Every structure is written in structure tokens, then in C-alpha cells.
Image (cartoon, helix red, strand yellow):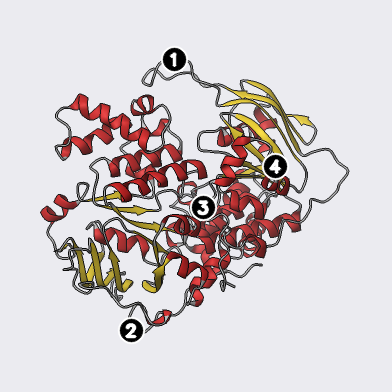
Amino acid sequence: MTATPTPPAAPETGSEQAAGPAPAPGPGAETGSDPGVLLAVRNLTISYAARKNAAPVPAVRGVDLTVRPGDVLALVGESGSGKSTTAHAVLGLLPPGARVDGGTIRYDGTDLAGADEAVLRAHRGRAIGLIPQDPAVSLNPVQRVGTQVAEVLLLHGLAPDRATALARAAELLGEAGLDRPRDRALQYPHELSGGMRQRALIAIALAARPRLLVADEPTSALDVTVQRTVLDHLDTLTRTAGTAVLLITHDLGVAADRARRIAVMARGRIVETGPTDEVLTAPRHPYTRSLLAAAPAFAPARRARPAAPRRTGLPDLLTAEDLVKEYPRRRTGPHGPLPPAVDGVSLRIARGETLALVGESGSGKSTTARLLLRLTAPTSGRITFDGQDITRLRGPALRALRRRLQIVYQNPYTSLDPRLAVDEIIAEPLRAFRVADRAERTRRVTELIDRVHLPAAVARRRPAELSGGQRQRVAIARALALRPDLVVCDEPVSALDVSAQARVLDVLAELQREDGLSYLFITHDLAVVRQIAHRVAVMRHGRIVETGPVETVFTAPADPWTRELLDAIPGRGRSPQGGG
């Protein structure tokens, strides 16, 4: 297994102590009184209330950050390091149970750490914009997307009337990278893909043209081409309007391409900060070096290539021929015919092979996966699994097929039942198919928890008590419970930080070597593809535009769209030194 970073013990004093000598602060940096400083966070300490009779849990410990107009500061670190807590404190949006124990947060001279709600509301949206991470809980499900963007303009008096606000909302959706923005403005959030919903949040955050933009993992759900479009737009803002960006991200490639400075956070402390090139090429702290070693964009050659599939002499496990999926136009949405979601897709997956399916959001990847899993029926085409035509299977035959085809979803927090303990979640498929008795199911669950490298103690915990990477490994264990032949991994690591991502990829590779599993690995992260896949199929507008061995496609892409995808990989071409 590849070594992954473990946060260092928290230093006793000073957020920079563990990183060596910190650069001398500029004039006024300590107080935030310098007119050249837009945001000055000084000695910020935040804790969360614990259960009865327990001491508060420290989340942020003595953090110092400085952001100037036009600056882009990336705050990077593992899940749970305190990045989002710091960002939410700037906007006064800490959750119940969290409190600021000390320090100051000065925005343009005003201390927001001790400000009342009226002051915070005056700053939110107009002066400081927020791009939250999860659009599923941030957008109103019963309002059209355009209405939600227009609301910001009306609330801050930036449009004279509703009609003008709605017209401007469509323009903002286009600036955020959405195609057919007028049509999208008329749709509801559930009618958009995850990446499209994230772009709607970006449009909302930018609507009032704030001077400071707090971007909390703003592109984690976006494919690389749209990610580049959105980040290019943010770059334009910083150049033309002097807008500063506090970029919270676990994607070191994005930080490398977009940030002028990087601050590395671990266990609530800033362990290293400095100019981007300096931090990436000559990292001083062991934790920073371990993060770089785990990042696919920086160390692809350090991770083992997937072993070649076993030669069985048997035909391909799964084949699809000319699959088409068409959806009817909704009466509440835009008018006119919809293009097919999947338009003549043909592909094959050999036994023990990983086929990566890549493409931008809305290209048809997830719909293709649902067709192959028979979770939805194709409009036309043919699907063969293990020599059997499964295109029109129904009833008991389709239920029997479910045991051999499993899926790991993108977001384990929403795909795992929050009411159940981990052992109950993993055992659920065994109970549903009445596999073995209770004692045998218990033994199988224990074995699966061990196989995905989780401690035995997680068995009685609930999903909310686990980290994102641990939850995703629980989802993998559940998918393996029935000993399937094919596992569809639908963006399984896109929401994880680089160290958790590395652990999950290692687990998937190990299980494939041991069990001969086949994977359909859906992703928009081409840096991950090189580590996990044997072959890759590139999708655009519902069609496969190119397919072949990973190295062939990456080194000599035949289709212009593939070349564009490869060129858009964040951090491409960087090779940090001293990051071993």
C-alpha cells in the first residue's frame, strides 16, 4: 500500500513554528489596519461543544492569515484540518455548537469575530461572497435556478425590477460556465447535474461582485474543462476588479495553478505558508511533503500502475452496443426537443479490467452507468453480461443480476443510511438477498471491514462519526458484500482530500488484484485515471469520442476533445522537488 500523509502532532506554540521561520509580516499585518490588507485573521481559535461533561473540542488553533486585494490564497489540507471552519468563521456562519474562543477577523478594518448579526448581514453577499461545497443542500429545491440568482441582485438593490434581475441572472449563469443559460435559469436544481448545480452556486456568489470571495471547494464536483472555465473567470475578477479569493481546496493541482500563495493546514494549525512555487517546489514541513506525495497531479509516477488483467481466455465480462437513452421534455422546463443523454454508446469491459469513463459534467457518463447496471432501461441498443443479453431482463432474473453488479456512489454521506451503524450498512445486501445466517453475516462483515483497511471499532459507529474517506471505504465494503463481478465506481474520490483519495484508490487496486474484480470507473479527474485504469473511454455529448489504453490516450490522443481535457488537468507539468 502507498504511504499516505498523517497529520503531525500539533505544535505547542505559534501556527508557523513547525514550519520553520515564517516570512516577516508586511506593515500593518498584525492589526489589519494597513489599507492594503483586505482580510486579516489573527490568532483565531475556534472550538466545538462536546457531549455532556466533556471539554470543548479545538478545531482551529491560533490561525493567522492575510489576504490583500486581488490576492488568491489557497488554504489546503486534509479533511478535518479546520479549513472550512476557518472560512465559515470569516462569514459568521459557524454551525451551532461552534464558538470563537479568541483572535480577530478584520475585513477592511472591521472586526467580524465579535460583530453582531446586522453587521455580518451587511457584509455577506455584497462585500464577501461564499461558494459553498455542497449544492445539494445549498440550493432551494422548489425554486428555479434563475430565481435564486436573481434574488441576490434584488436583495442588494442591484437590479431595478424582477425582469431585469432574471435577465442578468441568465448572464451570470453563462459566466459561471453553464451552457444554454436561459434554459438553465428556468430549471429546478434536481434537473441539473451535480456540476451544473455547483456552477449555479458560483453564479450566486459572484452576482453582487464582492471584494472578497470565500470559495470552499468550489470545483470539487466539476470536470476539468468546466473547472478551468470557472477558475479562469475567478482569475479575471481578481485582475479587473481587485477581487480577492480565499480558496479552500484539497486539490493541490488547482492550488498550484490558481493561487499566488498557499497556506497548509493540519489539525487546526497553519504549518506552512508562502508563495505557491516555493511551497510546492521546496516544502519545508513533512506534512506538506506527504500531501504532495499523495497528490495524483504531482506524483503519478510514484504510485504503481494497475497490474494487467488476468488472461482467462473467456469473452469480455460486459459489452454494450449502440446504447441510446432519450428523456422526454418536462412541461415545466424549456421547450423544444432534448438531445439524447446517451447517443449510440458502445464499450466493453474485460474480466479483471478497469475501464475509466471520463468526460465533462452532463456528457452522459452516469446515465451510461445506470443503463449498464439496468437501473434504467435503454431506448435502444443491447447490453450483454457474461454472455447473456440483459437488455430486457425483468423480475427474478433481474434481481439475480443485481448480486453480480454493484455501485459505489460519489457521495457516501448521502448513499449510506445515517440511522444505521456501519456493520448494519455492510450487512444490508446480505440480509436483502437472504445470504447465510446471522453468524455467517457477522463474520463476513468483520472480514469486509478489515479488507478495506478500517479499524474494527468502526463497526458500531454511524456514518456521521466517520471521515469522508472512511465513509467511502464503508461504501466499498457494502458493494463487495455479495461478491460481485463488476463494480461501477461513480466519481468515488472526487469529494475526498488527496490522502483519503490515495487510501481509497489503494483499496480498490488491492481488491482487484486479489479477487479479479472488474471496474467501470467514472471520473472527471484524469490524473486519477492514470493510476487506476487499464483503458479509458472519453465521452462528449452522449457519445464515445475516443477509447484505448490509458498510456496511448494520454500520450497520443487522437481526438481534439481528449487533448483539451488533458490540457485542462490542474497542475499538469509541475514536478515539485523535495516532495518525497
Residue 242 seen in the figure: yes
Secondary structure at numbered mark 4: loop
In front: label 3 or label 4: 3
| Residue at horizontal 61 percent and vertical 70 percent from the top | 3
The residue at which mark 3 appears reads as: 570
Q: Is residue 247 left or right of residue 121?
A: right
Between 238 and 452, the one lying in front of the other is: 238
Between 472 and 213, the one lying in front of the other is: 213
The residue at which mark 4 appears reads as: 404
Vertical arrangement, residue 170 with respect to residue 200, above or below: above
Which of marks 1 and 4 precedes in the sequence? Answer: 1
Circles 3 and 1 in contact, beta carbons < 8 Å: no
Circles 3 and 4 in contact, beta carbons < 8 Å: no
The residue at which mark 1 appears reads as: 336
Which of marks 4 and 2 precedes in the sequence? Answer: 2
Cα–Cα gap, marks 3 and 2: 35 Å
Residue 468 percent location from the top left of the image? 48, 58
Cα–Cα gap, marks 2 and 4: 54 Å
Circles 2 and 4 in contact, beta carbons < 8 Å: no
Circles 3 and 2 in contact, beta carbons < 8 Å: no
Cα–Cα gap, marks 3 and 4: 36 Å
Which of marks 2 and 3 precedes in the sequence? Answer: 2
Q: Can you name the residue that lies furthest to the bottom here?
A: 12
